[in-house]
Image (spheres, rainbow, N blue to C red):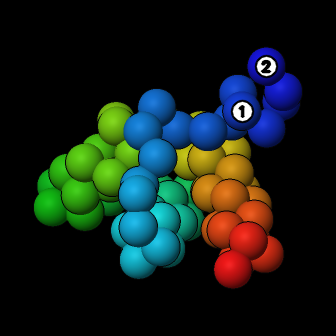
Amino acid sequence: MSKFNQQLPPQIPQSRDKIERAICLLGSRVKGELTSKPQQELSDLVGRYPNPLEATAWKQSLKQLLKQKQKQK
């Protein structure tokens, strides 16, 4: 398993919009604790609520995944 795969969240959002939303929420999580509604939304999107270090890694991985999807089109 590559380092890239190890940094992916337990669950990958399936649509481009959901990936972008997850990236946004992960960015907010890096900066601090989320309130209950965004916290639940993030958990639903990526499989669980991350700590700030995981949020940083997952955000980078999802950004990379988004770039790869754009190249495929």
Q: Residue at x 75, y 65 (%)?
A: 68
Please identify the quadrant where the C terminus is shown: bottom right
Residue in front for this viewpoint, 45 or 65: 65
Report the side of 4 relative to 59 (left or right).
right
Few, some or many residues within 10 Å of mark 1 (<14, 14–19, 20+): few
Please identify the quadrant where the N terminus is shown: top right
Residue 44 coordinates in the image, percent (x, y): 25, 48
Report the side of 44 relative to 49 (left or right).
left
Image-quadrant location for residue 41: bottom left
Q: Residue at x 34, y 35 (%)?
A: 48
Residue 5 coordinates in the image, percent (x, y): 72, 33
Disc 2 to disc 1: CB gap under 8 Å: yes
- Which residue in the structure is indicated by mark 2? 1
| Residue 24 in sight in this render | no
**47 shown above or below 38:** above
SS of the residue at dot 1?
A: helix
Amino acid bearing label 2: Met
Q: Residue at x 50, y 59 (%)?
A: 26
Report the side of 16 relative to 37 (left or right).
right
Q: How far, Cα to Cα, is label 2 from label 1?
A: 6 Å
- Which residue in the structure is indicated by mark 1? 5
